[in-house]
Image (cartoon, rainbow, N blue to C red):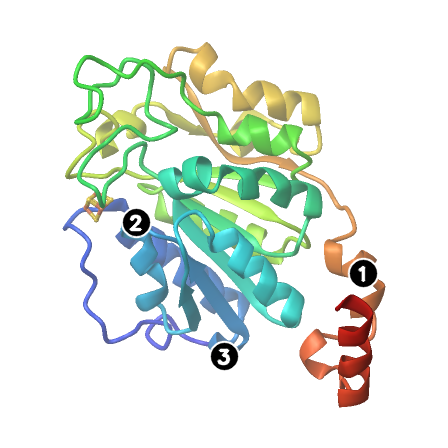
Amino acid sequence: MSSIQELTTKEKPQWCPGCGNFGLHMALKGALSELGIPKEKTVLVSGVGCSGKASHYINTYGFESLHGRSVTVASGVKLANHGLTVIAEGGDGDGYGIGSAHFLHSFRRNIDLTYIVHDNSIYGLTTGQASPTSQHGMKTKSTPHGNLEMQFNPLAVAIAAGGTFVARVFAGDMAHMKEVFKQALQHKGFALVDVLQPCVTFNKLNTFAWWQQRVYKLESAGHDPKNKAAAMEKAFEEMSSNYSKIPTGVFYKEERPTYVDESPQLASGPLIGHAVKSAEIEKAFEEFM
Ligand code: SF4
C-alpha cells in the first residue's frame, strides 16, 4: 500500500491555482492509497494538454503519450503486462476530439483499465478554444460569435458503444470523486470516468459555482446502474433539462469478459513472463516476411 505522500512526486504542479486538476489528482491518489494498490504496480499514461502533466505529478510509473493517444498506449501497457493497474488520463479535447476513434473502440474491446477524462469543456493548454464538450452557443476564442456545433455526449456514446463502466463526477466533490474512482479501479473492464472540472482561466461559463448549482448524485436518486435504458436517459438529462440538472455517479455498469480474459495468448500469464525462444522469433519472421 502507498500513502498519498508516497504517491506524490517532488515536482511542483504547473497548473493554474484553482484548477480542477488539483482536486482530481488528490482524489485519485486517495483512491489508489485506500485500495492498497502499490505504486510500483501502477502505470499512469497521460495525453497532451494541461492534463498531460498528470503523469509527472504522481509517483507511479508514467508515460506522457501523444495527443489523443493515452488510451492506446495504456492498452498496450495492459496487454504487455496485465498484472498492472493501468490508468489513462486526458482532457476532453484530447480524448473526445483528437482521440475520438480510440475512445469509441475501447468500449468494444473492454481492456481492463481506467480512463479518467479531465472534462473542462475547453482547450486549456492552447488558451481557450472550443472543445467537443463546449456548449452550443458558447463564446470562446475560436467561437467569438458562439459555438455552432452540438455538444458531444461522451456518456451516451460510451453506453451505446458497449461500455461496461460509465461514470461522471464533479471535481468540486472530492469525497464522491474518490469513491467513484475506487469503483472504476476495481471494475474488471474498461472504466470511463468523465470529470466535470472547471478551467478557471479560460472557461468563464462552466465555473465551480455553475456546476455546483446543477449537479446531483444518481445514487441519491434511486438510479439502477444495471438498467441500460435508464442510464441512457440519464446521459441525456443534462441537455434535455437545458442544463438545469446534471447527474453524477455511476450511470451504467455490467460484467463482461475482458479482452485479456478472451485472449488465448494471455491465458498462461502476462506477456512479459512468456519465454520466447529466438528460433520461434525467426520462424515468425519467415512466416510474415
Ligand atoms: Fe487548469 Fe485551465 Fe489552467 Fe489548464 S489553463 S491548468 S485547465 S485552469
Considering the numbered disc 3 on the image, is that residue within a helix, a strand or a loop?
A: helix
Considering the numbered disc 2 on the image, is that residue within a helix, a strand or a loop?
A: loop
Which residue lies under the disc numbered 3?
40
From the Cβ of disc 2, is ligand 1 less than 8 Å away? yes
Amino acid type, label 3:
Glu
Considering the numbered disc 1 on the image, is that residue within a helix, a strand or a loop?
A: loop
**Dot 1, how many residues are within 10 Å of its Cα: few (below 14), some (14-19), or many (20+)?**
few
Mark seen at residue 99:
none
Q: CA distance from mark 3 to mark 1?
A: 25 Å
Q: Extreme front residue here?
A: 289
Mark seen at residue 49:
2
Residue 240 at x, y percent in the picture: 47, 11
> Residue drawn 40% across and 21% down?
151
- Ligand 1 resides in the quarter of the picture at top left
Q: Are marks 3 and 2 in contact (CB under 8 Å)?
A: no
Q: CA distance from mark 3 to mark 2?
A: 25 Å
Can you tell which of label 3 and label 2 is closer to the viewer?
2
